[in-house]
Image: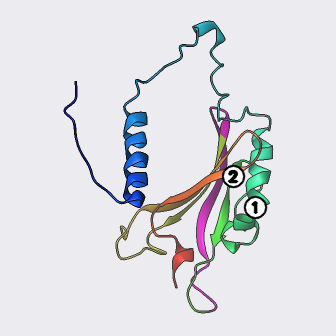
């Protein structure tokens, strides 16, 4: 049995003590768990990947029509279908800019699971243009890459490679 405890309080404090006691009593109740038989468990959530319902050409057209590509002169020299062609790379900098620099522009579309990866890769001779951190001889290249889901939405974009002529300020 519990020892007897005598408390003398004003009426407002009694109400507070009763409230605190009720909270303590409720928090000390044993936990109850309900077990659900495995046969009635809900099925797992559907996959977050969208099944591929578009073609490689549709993925390329989704990228080409996106504001990031359509509104940028960087992508003008690239083929509008998968393939490679000689191109003239116009560099940045004060007008008229550097270049043109002779190069090769490659457009490629690769299936990757339920998605596509669309790459635009430009290649040029370092003797024509190179950044101070890049080699001064040989072939240099820069790639812009877009991941397109099965519904035709661009879900990721990145770029990598050497310092592109277009980046000159």
Q: Position of residue 60 (x, y in %)?
A: 75, 50
Most foreground residue, 48 or 4: 4
Secondary structure category for the residue under label 1: loop
Q: Residue at x 51, y 81 (%)?
A: 168
Q: Residues within 10 Å of mark 1 (few under 14, many from 20)?
A: few
Classed neighbour count for the residue bearing mark 2: other residues with Cα under 10 Å, few (<14), some (14–19), many (≥20) = some
| Residue 93 drawn above or below residue 140 | below
Looking at the picture, how far across and down is residue 72, in whole percent?
70, 72
Q: Is residue 127 magenta?
A: no
Q: Which quadrant does the N terminus fall into?
A: top left
Q: Identify the residue at horizontal 70%, vertical 61% (top origin).
A: 78
Left or right position of 52 against 157: right
Secondary element type, mark 2: strand
40 to 168, vertically: above or below? above
Closest to the observer, 1 or 121 = 1
- The residue at the point 63 percent across, 7 percent down is 39
Residue 136, image x and y in percent? 37, 71
Q: Which residues are magenta?
A: 95-115
Q: Which residue is mark 1?
A: 66
Query: On the image, numbered disc 2 is attached to which residue?
Result: 154
- Which residue of the protein is positioned furthest toward the left in this rendering? 3
Question: Who's the residue at 75% across and 66% down the image?
Answer: 67
Residue placed most toward the observer, 109 or 89? 109
Instruction: Estimate the spatial distance between the alpha carbons at disc 1 and disc 2, rounded to whole Å.
Output: 8 Å
User: Where residue 75 is drawn, which disc sits there?
Assistant: none
Query: Could you tell me residue 154's position as x and y percent?
Result: 69, 52
Residues at marks 1 and 2 touching, judged by CB atoms closer than 8 Å: yes
């Amino acid at each position: 049995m519990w020892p007897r405890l005598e408390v003398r309080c004003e009426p407002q404090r009694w109400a507070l003590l009763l409230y605190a006691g009720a909270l303590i009593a409720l928090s000390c109740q044993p936990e109850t768990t309900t077990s659900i038989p495995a046969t009635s468990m809900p099925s797992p959530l559907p996959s977050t990947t969208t099944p591929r319902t578009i073609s490689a050409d549709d993925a390329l057209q989704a990228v080409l029509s996106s504001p990031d590509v359509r509104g940028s002169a960087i992508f003008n020299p690239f083929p509008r279908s998968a393939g490679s062609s000689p191109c003239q790379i116009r560099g940045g900098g004060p007008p008229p800019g550097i270049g043109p620099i002779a190069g090769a522009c490659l457009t490629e579309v690769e299936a990757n699971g339920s998605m596509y990866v669309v790459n635009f890769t430009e290649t040029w001779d370092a003797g024509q243009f190179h950044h101070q951190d890049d080699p001064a001889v040989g072939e240099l290249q820069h790639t812009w890459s877009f991941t397109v889901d099965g519904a035709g939405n661009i879900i990721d974009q990145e770029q990598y490679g050497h310092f592109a002529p277009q980046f000159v300020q």
